[in-house]
Image (tube, rainbow, N blue to C red):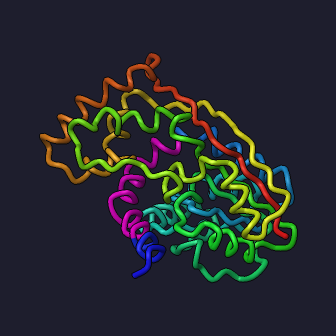
Amino acid sequence: MNVIRQADDDQQALWNGIAGRGWVEAQAITDRMFNPIEDLLVEAVAAGPADRVLDVGCGTGSTTLAIARRLGPNSRCTGLDISEPMIFAARARAERECMPVRFILDNAQTHVFEPASFDTIVSRFGVMFFDDPVRAFANLRRAAAGNARIRFLAWRSAAENPFMTTAEHAAAPLLPGLLARQPDAPGQFAFADRRRVHTILDTSGWADIDIQPVDVACTLPENELTHYLSRLGPVGRILQEADDQTRRQVLEMVRPAFDRYVQGAEVRFTAACWMASARAR
């Protein structure tokens, strides 16, 4: 098995296992926490011509549904994700809201799209996990109609997002098996380097590339912080399968490390992101 296929299989297993389950269980927390980021995408889509929208790495469907609500009943919105538990949750949400939104379980890197079938492609933190990003964005470009635009938000560097790495730094003494994040590897901070993102988009057939830094104030209720820590991120994935004693010890060590982010009943932090856009050649 080659390295690319191995990485692809790793992502498939991750998002259909503990990572996918964790995001479903923390859906309400993450929806609220990332709502200001979601709003940026919704406003950007609504400002331009957009009737056929694809949301890449749609997760549990929050952004897809928000765009569908904003564009109205004449739009055609589709969400796509590799995670079966998250797609199942997204479809259930759409059914509860009686929203005619389609959700596809597949990998955007290899999915056979109908050519030129979307005039807008978006993603909220869903494009950093491709093992071959040039191949993935080339596939998305083929799915884009002429002059269609892609807009996505991706994390900048780990150094600029200390909130996102606080748990693993604090838990390291108790979790010696916690793996260090690898630069440019598929994962949260894979698009930290703006020049790399520009090269990926240019090589895969996108033009008029614009990548701008945005800093977004995010919050979550303080009383939900422990639940968040026990479900998401590298530490959360380990804790989902840890015994009760390990889970308790790790949370007792990790939780105080977040005191600097607590203001009253809220946890507040800044999400340092890239807002990227490009046009299909």
Q: Residue at x 54, y 65 (%)?
A: 130
Quadrant (top left/top right/bottom left/bottom right) for the C terminus: bottom right
**In the image shown, does 181 or 16 lie closer to the viewer?**
181
Which of 120/164 is in front?
A: 164
> Residue 254 occupies which quadrant of the picture?
top left
Q: Where is residue 33 in the image (x, y as percent from the top left)?
A: 52, 38
- Residue at the spot 51% in from the left edge and 66% down from the top edge: 91
Within the magenta stretch, is there residue 30?
Answer: yes
The magenta-colored residue range is 10-32
Residue occupying the point 61% across, 66% down: 133
Q: Where is residue 78 in the image (x, y as percent from the top left)?
A: 65, 68
Question: Residue 126 appears in which quarter of the rendering?
Answer: bottom right
Query: Looking at the image, which is closer to me, 256 or 166?
Result: 166
Q: Is residue 120 above or below residue 240?
A: below
Residue 2 image-quadrant placement? bottom left
Q: Is residue 175 left or right of residue 169?
A: left
Residue plotted at (38% across, 21% down): 259
